[in-house]
Amino acid sequence: MAPFTVRAVVLLRKVWAALPSFRWLLLASMAALWCAAGHFGFVEFLREKVIDWRFAYRGEIASPARLIYVDIDSQALSEIGGFPWSRSYFARTCAALVEHGGVKAIGIDVVFSENGVAEAIDWQKRVNGHREFARYLSKPPPVVLAASYAAAQYRDINGQLAFRQLPLVEPGKTYEDAALPEMPAFRISEHEGSRLWSPGLIGLIDTMHGDTRVVPAYAPTIVRPFLHMSIELARLYFDVPPDGVKISEDHIDLVREDGSLARRIPLLDGQFIEVNWFSAWDSFENPRVSFSTVYAYAEMLHSGDAEERAAAEEFFAQAEFKDAIVLIGPVDPLLQDLATTSFDSMVPVPKVGVHGNMVKTIVSGKFLQRPAAFRDVAWLEHLITMTLSLGVCWLATIGGTRGALPKLAAVLLLVGYIYTAFWIFAHAHYILPITLPVLSAFTTSFVGVIWQLVDEQRQKGRIKGMFGTYVSPALVERMVESGEDPQLGGVEENITAYFSDIQSFSTFSEKLSPPRLVSLMNEYLTACTDIVQSEGGTLDKYIGDAVVAIYGAPLALPDHPLRACVAALRVHRRVAELREKWRHEGDQWPQIVHELQTRIGLNTGPAVVGNMGSQTRFNYTMMGDNVNLAARMESGAKSWGVYTLCTEATKAGCLAHDPERVVFRALGRIVVKGRAQAVPIHEIVALKEDIDDRTRECIALFEQGLERYYARDWEAALALFSRSAALEPNQPGVTVGVTSNPSLVYQRIVEEVRHETLPADWDGVYVMKEK
């Protein structure tokens, strides 16, 4: 491999290893990208949909004022005729509603334009209608006519939908040519062109592409500011004079003649109002009646028939008209004045409902509110986005891929924020940002969890590569599933050290050729290792025929003394099976193989475990005084005529977890070579299910003899040891490979000490002279 390639690989490895350090910086950058997307309007559609969902969650709210729609519907078009109608219909209908119905104000959502009128119509009849309507408006009544205000759409600094203000003077024109809304036009002579007639009130209506979320509050033309129709209607409802409308930079005040403030209307971007939708179009909150019905009753007011006049008076005297605001507007789909709303997002509905909901918004004072910072910059939305994203991502990843509680907390935090935003909207009409924070939090958390999953898979591979050769696959999986890194590099843990060795192994080397010896050892070591690992042990190393293992590290096992004892007994059982197998293989193996025995020593206590060795080559191992003592148990088993020897600590740990599983025999207290402190030792005799009555009796007699030995009753001790010797399961010359047993060993010890002069404080401790 070329030097450059080697350097590149090394660099990539360093970058990969350093990535976790930059994880949160990268995730924060991802959240910042979402902020940028919101700033440039890429999520505007979702923003609008989420606002629609808030209205759906809040539901309809009662109207603060009586508002009635008089519909130019299919019935009216069928009974009166196709559009445009003679304006006399509007004059007579409005007059009846005001004079006989007692309404507070009437808004007509129809632009009375002369554009597009066919020349073949009866112009005299049309002019007469103009004059009749003009005479009525000259009184003047509380009637607001519509002026069409077209504006160019744009997105403000926050990415919110907005509209350019109508310029005072368009570029290249003089003040005399200042742009004005399309005003109501009245052709008062069939021989004259259209001319502006504005004796009544003019209210703006917006005609931009059907959007119904934001409406222009006024048009700041050079002539005078023209207010939106809903503001004019609210002014009439509150009995505010025309000069009581005070426009400032961020609000419009409606001030009564006595100086009291009727309503303060907040403005977005200095010119717009956001609609607060009170109900869907087809709702009981929106009483409606056909224009043709109202007009018919208006005509009946002047009927020569007294009954018809009485019926008409009764119709207009109904309580629903008294002090109500009436909106006259097109609702028939053929008139194409339709748009979707927050409550009617699937099917377009008449846009006259925009004016109705705007009137309700102003009269009730329930204006939609946003954080003040949103009017100029979106820093607060960005702050919420960054904070929520990193908070949810932190909770989603803190517990690892299997940390259920932190992930549940992350979900609850996200859902809780959404619910809080919906709840605040429903109760305070306040719009907290949802779209950007939730999108950012979800995606950053998703990426964080995926990233963590990749890291954990890499970590799993590292753990399996590190421990897979000397820890059982089941234990490796438990280590991986635990989500915890093993504490490497030398930490103190409470463990059980396991040492085993083949009796007289040097003789095997003399009797077997190297290939045959390797074959034998592979079969033996495989059997031993499988059992050690199946009980949760960690293979430390092989030293020739010796097997060294650790119980309780690198993964904590609370019952590691019990596991080690069971493993030792299972190894002896398996070795017996192997001896039988080798014996049945005839002359393939020499007699010494048929007599193969293994000795095992165990000790439990604190020891240092971890990766130890050089910087370039190391091994996961254990060291410490308790490890050395376990090795002494293995070598000392020969001196006591047993094949499995353990300390008091191992026995106590085993019985603490299962007092019935393993049978022990106390062998006294000894001082091993290299130590000064006495250690109680025990033979691990058998599993409870494997022991017979003969062996139980042997153990009972032996332990009675041991008591007499400590009491210096030499004759009684010898008698008991003699009786137990006859019952020993391992008999020299009978049991394969056995040259002694504990009863025989203690008969020799008693004979030695009974002829010695013992000190007064003699406690029966036996000092080992060999390792």
Image (tube, rainbow, N blue to C red):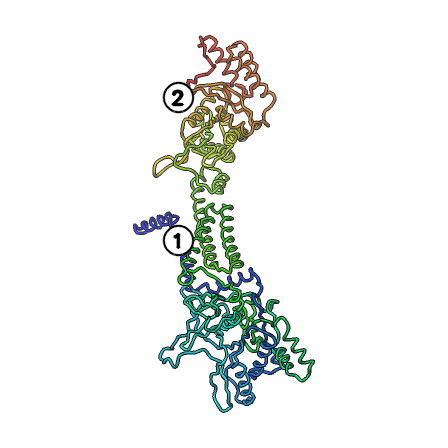
Give the x, y percent position of residue 547. 45, 31
Residue labelled with disc 1: 26
Q: Is residue 670 left or right of residue 306?
A: left
Q: Quadrant of the C terminus?
A: top left
Check the image and report above or below for 533 versus 199.
above
Give the x, y percent position of residue 214. 48, 68
Q: Is residue 459 visible?
A: yes
Residue at (51%, 50%) from the top-left corner? Answer: 412
Q: Which mark is residue 678?
A: none
In the current view of this chain or complex, which residue is farthest to the left?
A: 3
Of the pair 283 and 360, the residue shown nearer to us: 360
As shown in the figure, which amino acid type bears the numbered disc 2? Gly
- As measured in the structure, the alpha-carbon distance from the residue carrying label 2 to the one carrying label 1 is 58 Å
Check the image and report above or below for 527 versus 357.
above
Residue at (31%, 50%) from the top-left corner? Answer: 7
Residue labelled with disc 2: 674
Of the pair 380 and 30, the residue shown nearer to us: 380
Give whichever of discs 2 and 1 has the lower sequence position: 1
Picture mark count: 2
Give the x, y percent position of residue 48. 49, 64
